[in-house]
Image (cartoon, rainbow, N blue to C red):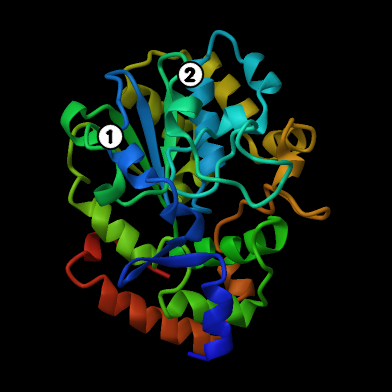
Amino acid sequence: MDEELKKKALKKCYFMRPDLVMPGIMEKNNILTNVKNFQVRDDDVFLVTYPKAGTIWTCEILDAILNIDNLEVLKTRSLFEKIPMLELGPSLHPDLVADGVEGIPSNIKAILDPCPSPRRIPTHLLPEYCPDQLFTKKPKTVLVDRNPKDYLVSLFGWYASIRFLSPLDWNEMYEIYMNGLSEYGPYHSFIKSWAKYENEPWLLWMKYEDLRQNPKGSIKKITTFLGKNLTDSQIDDVMRVTSFDYMKKAMETVKGRDAYLNPKGVWQRKGVVGNWKNAFTIAQNEAFNKQYDEEMKGYEHLKYKF
């Protein structure tokens, strides 16, 4: 890998361990200890996603289900209230981020402790960095998987939109990912790490593509998993307020969004399935497939068919 490109990839990152690159902000203030010791409530609802694998969208779906009798409250929430992440990277809390400056380590207790139950808690973390109590109390947890090629294209667009990330051209983004230097490590590593819990009754494994192609069936599946009894009319309401067009329009005016976006940046770009075909060259696609097949040996049941 070109050394200049490697320096660019690591500009905002560092190695959490030899094969895992994470946001550089994480190494300060004992954040990892704070997260590992985070107090989980029995009625918490966790959302596990890799970045750009439908995090905000699924957060909105969960919020709509949990607030089905008061959907109007979703319109008044700031960006910071929508995604109080259990995270080791930059905070999205208004008291901890200075007007779009890079951000400082999250004070986990300050952000999540005041949240009323049931809390919806999204995270991008590998199991080894999650709260210990997640695996002892075992609250309801939804994991959303996504075609790694579409994820990579979405990440490429994200780098161009967010103020604290340095824009890359497509070939640079591709090379950084293929060399294991994208933030949070390769997508296949994330999936394999969580695969050990895929059959646990407290975890629901979903695919982004199913949510997109069959939203009603997917939302029903989530409500059943959460033990909620929603009518068909209520399911339709959840679909309405979590449709891509509805969310895209709503995000244009949500309080706090400009703290993280470039002047021309967007939170929702396309939200489509299969957009990777417009970005990958033939050679890139072949190399990606070869690496993916090698890395997913033993996990064929979780592989995507491209």
In the image, what residue occupies the spot 66% across and 14% down? 72
Q: Which mark is residue 37?
A: 1
In the image, what residue occupies the spot 34% across and 22% down? 226
Q: Is residue 221 visible?
A: no
Q: How many neighbours does mark 1 have within 10 angstroms: few (below 14), some (14-19), or many (20 or more)?
A: few
Front residue of 230/292: it is 292
> Would residue 48 be found to the left or right of residue 213 on screen?
left
> Would residue 89 be found to the left or right of residue 222 on screen?
right
> Would residue 191 be found to the left or right of residue 239 on screen?
left
Where is residue 81 shown, x and y percent of the image? 59, 27
Q: Is residue 81 above or below residue 35?
A: above
Where is residue 213 shown, x and y percent of the image? 51, 46
Q: Is residue 237 above or below residue 96?
A: above
Q: Secondary structure at mark 1?
A: loop
Q: Which residue is mark 2?
A: 115
Q: Is residue 132 visible?
A: yes
Q: Is residue 158 above or below residue 282?
A: above
What residue type is disc 1 on?
A: Asn
Q: Earlier in the sequence, mark 1 or mark 2?
A: 1
Q: Secondary structure at mark 2?
A: loop
Which dot, 1 or 2, sits closer to the camera? 1
